[in-house]
Structure formats: C-alpha cells, structure tokens
Image (tube, rainbow, N blue to C red):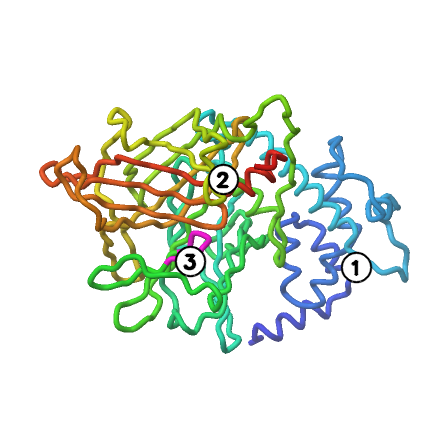
C-alpha cells in the first residue's frame, strides 16, 4: 500500500509534459491552489502557455488593459516557448491577476459613487465589502518574537461603521503584546469549508502597544476595558490581565480602499487634494460644516443625528481649536433623549457580558463642500460630573469626552431617573486650527 508521500513522489516522477497537460484543464483558482503543493508544482503552475490560455479565455475579448509599462511590453511577446527556454517565468500569470484586480477595482469604484447626502459616504460600502469577500485579521506580535494571527469571530455593520470582534484562541497577557497589526484580507470564494485562505493582505494600521498604553474606561464583574487609538478596545479578565477579547471599530470612510489597496507592509495612502483658496470669503473654512453623529453598541442604535450649517467665527477660535457647537446648552429645542441605555456588550469564547456607561461613537464631519473632513469610530464612556445639577432638569449631570490628534468631542447628558434615560443637553466638536488651515489653505 502506498503512503501519501510515495503517491506524491510518483506524481512528480511523471514527465513534465504530462503534468502540464493535466494542469492545462484547471482554472485560475485551482491552478493557484496546486502551486502550493510542492516546489515542482509551483514551477509548473507558473507555465506561460497555460496562463496565456486562461487569460485569453477570460479577458481576450475585452477591451480593458492595464496601463502600459515595461512589464506589459514584455507580455506582448508570443507566449509559446521553445525547447530549452524557461517555462516558469510566470509572466502571463502576473498579467492575469493584474487584469482581474484592475477590473474589480473599476467595478467596485463605480458602485461606490452613490454617496449619501447625510453621511457623505458611499451607500454601498457594506455590500461591496461582502461581495468582494473582504474580512479582517489581527496579528499580535509578542515580546518573545512569537506572532499570533486571529480571525474575527463576528462583524457588526452600521450605517457608517463596522465593529469587528476577535475572541477565542490562545490569548496572552496584555503586557506580553508588543504590537498589534490589522489587515484587510480578501478571501477566495470557498469551494469547500476548508478553502478559506486569504488571497491578499492589506495592512490598515500597526499599533505599538509599548508606546500607546491606552487607558481603562469601564468594567463589569468579569472584564476591564482598555482603549487604544485608533478604535481598539481590549477586554482583559479582572485579576489576571489576560486578554479575553479584542474589539476593533472601523469607520466606513475609505474602508474599502484601506482593506484592498494597501500592501502587506504599507497601508493605503489617500491622495491629497487641496481645495482652491477663496479670497472672497473672509471666513473660508469656518462655516458650512455638517455632522453625522451616531452613538451605538454592537446591536443597538442609541442616538443618530444629522446636523448642518455648523460654523465658528474667527473671533471664537481659542487655544488653537475651531469650536463647532452642535447642540447648544442654552437652546432647549435642540436637546434630545437617547433611545436606549448606554452600555457596551462583549463576548469571549465562552462568556459574555455588558459594561454600563460605555458605547461606540461614530462621527463623520463634512466640510462646506460636503466632503469627509474628520471621520472617527471609537469606544467612549460617560462619567458623573462633579459640577452642580442642571437647572433645567431634575437629574444628575454626566460628561462624555473624546479626543485624538484629529479633534475633540465634548457631550453633556442628564440622567432622568424617573424616565430611566439620558438626555443630551450639549454637544460640541473641536477641530485643530492647523487641520483647517492645511485643508482650506488658510492661515487662521
């Protein structure tokens, strides 16, 4: 009886002409898979004649071509190779995947042109991500040099953000993690439950845990929550400091591009388009802002609002910050109640719970041309204020603060005990004046 090893050797002892004939009946996906079997099959599966046949079958009658380059010029030669030539150059294989990738990019970019007037974001972000089989992976790099790759256990999609949960597996103690890397991965369409390997990895961000320690912002009887920018929530078991789960919040702005168009070592870089200077407007860049603001958790929308015509006069710029008053403390008609309790559910491999007074904030600030200006999705928390109670409401005053290098958010809430709900009485967004100057070519 032959073992698997002897069978593999028997196949590889066949003449290369017979093996190439067998491989010529495979499609692109199967050919790519069999190239992973051994070095011999890897060389044979790069055969130019086979890939030229696949290329002409899939793209030969189509007019789309990649932009000309020295590589493309080399691909115009006759794919038929003579005896003694290297059959494993893989030129037509590269051409095939470049053409396929280019057509995919054009297709989903057309779908992303439908933009919501409320969020300023493409309406079809979630469907494009699902149709392209896009997912995300975390790589934990340990101080010992070990690397652990984690696949998401669940993803939640909302109107302008996604929450990706990572739990299960063999977790470390928090202090053992040196850095965390988030990748967008595009998985091949599975033909079997086992065929789930990613076809491409695009680095979205790399977080150095040793320099960004984060801060604790909530806990329940089982876990403590630690926040790290950008948008990372790490739950550790109380009394152990062992990681129970990792939650990543992703804003939809350029999420498809970040998940697909970066390289395994370099994130996608968004092109910079400076706006033309408007010398006729003495306060250009200080008015006409719109804000789409959402408070939610993994399953419930707590608050959602669209606010327009936000502005800040030049004389109101203080401390290097442009202040945009969204909900005015003194305007009772702008105050609004929250539709649910502020809490953040969590789930590990075996347990689940919920941390009170914590949730997710997703903010999309649009400039006066209704283009995304500041986009963020992150865990936030509310704390009881030390100041006096509100004169207009008979309840306790709470505060919510958020800040990152791109801006700040300050919210005031009142807890109405009888109604058992929060009421928002103030919401202010602050943007660094240097960000405004850079975006609008001004000099405030």
Of badges 1 and 3, the one in the foreground is 3
Quadrant where the N terminus is found in the figure: bottom right
Q: Which residue is mark 1?
A: 88
Query: Depth check: 58 or 415 in front?
Result: 415
In which quarter of the view is residue 37 placed?
bottom right
Q: Which residues are magenta?
A: 227-232
Query: Depth check: 332 or 373 in front?
Result: 332
Mark 1 vs mark 2, CA separation in Å: 48 Å
Q: Badges 1 and 2: C-beta atoms under 8 Å apart?
A: no
Q: Which residue is outermost to the bottom?
A: 144
Counting residues from the start of the chain, the first of labels 1 and 2 encountered is 1
Q: Which residue is mark 2?
A: 374
Membership of 231 in magenta stretch: yes
Badge 1 marks a residue whose secondary structure is loop
Q: Which residue is outermost to the top?
A: 280
Depicted 222 relative to depicted 74: above or below: below
Q: Position of residue 62 (x, y in %)?
A: 73, 31
Membership of 242 in magenta stretch: no
Mark 1 vs mark 3, CA separation in Å: 47 Å
Badge 2 marks a residue whose secondary structure is strand
Q: Residue 335 vs residue 272: left or right?
A: left
Residue drawn at point x = 38 percent, y = 35 percent: 293
Of badges 1 and 2, the one in the foreground is 2
Residue drawn at point x = 49 percent, y = 52 percent: 136
Q: Residue 343 vs residue 74: left or right?
A: left
Quadrant where the C terminus is found in the figure: top right
Q: Position of residue 361 (x, y in %)?
A: 36, 43
Q: Which residue is mark 3?
A: 228
């Amino acid at each position: 009886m032959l073992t698997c090893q002897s069978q593999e050797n028997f196949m590889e002892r066949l003449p290369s002409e017979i093996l190439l004939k067998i491989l010529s009946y495979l499609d692109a996906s199967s050919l790519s898979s069999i190239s992973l079997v051994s070095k011999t099959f890897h060389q044979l599966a790069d055969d130019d004649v086979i890939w030229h046949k696949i290329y002409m079958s899939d793209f030969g009658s189509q007019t789309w071509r990649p932009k000309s380059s020295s590589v493309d010029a080399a691909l115009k030669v006759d794919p038929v190779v003579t005896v003694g030539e290297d059959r494993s150059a893989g030129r037509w294989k590269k051409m095939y995947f470049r053409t396929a990738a280019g057509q995919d990019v054009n297709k989903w970019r057309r779908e992303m042109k439908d933009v919501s007037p409320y969020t300023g974001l493409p309406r079809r972000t979630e469907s494009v991500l699902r149709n392209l089989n896009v997912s995300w992976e975390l790589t934990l790099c340990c101080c010992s040099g070990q690397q652990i790759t984690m696949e998401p256990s669940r993803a939640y999609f909302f109107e302008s953000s996604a929450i990706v949960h990572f739990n299960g597996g063999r977790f470390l103690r928090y202090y053992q993690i040196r850095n965390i890397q988030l990748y967008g991965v595009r998985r091949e369409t599975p033909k079997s439950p086992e065929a789930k390997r990613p076809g491409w990895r695009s680095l979205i961000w790399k977080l150095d845990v040793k320099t960004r320690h984060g801060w604790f912002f909530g806990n329940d009887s089982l876990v403590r929550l630690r926040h790290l920018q950008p948008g990372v929530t790490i739950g550790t078991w109380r009394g152990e400091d062992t990681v129970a789960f990792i939650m990543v919040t992703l804003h939809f702005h350029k999420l498809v591009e970040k998940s697909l168009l970066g390289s395994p070592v370099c994130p996608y870089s968004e092109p910079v388009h400076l706006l033309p200077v408007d010398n006729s407007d003495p306060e250009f860049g200080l008015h006409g802002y719109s804000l789409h603001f959402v408070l939610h958790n993994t399953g419930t929308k707590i608050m959602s609002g669209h606010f327009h015509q936000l502005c800040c006069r030049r004389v109101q710029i203080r401390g290097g910050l442009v202040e945009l008053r969204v909900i005015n403390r003194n305007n009772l008609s702008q105050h609004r109640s929250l539709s649910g309790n502020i809490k953040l559910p969590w789930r590990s491999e075996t347990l689940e719970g919920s941390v009170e007074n914590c949730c997710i904030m997703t903010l999309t600030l649009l400039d006066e041309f209704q283009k995304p200006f500041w986009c963020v999705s992150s865990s936030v928390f509310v704390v009881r204020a030390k100041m006096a109670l509100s004169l207009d409401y008979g309840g306790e005053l709470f505060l919510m603060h958020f800040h990152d290098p791109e801006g700040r958010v300050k919210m005031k809430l009142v807890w109405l005990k009888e109604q058992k709900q929060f009421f928002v009485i103030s919401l202010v967004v602050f943007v660094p004046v240097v960000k405004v100057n850079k975006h609008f070519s001004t000099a405030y």
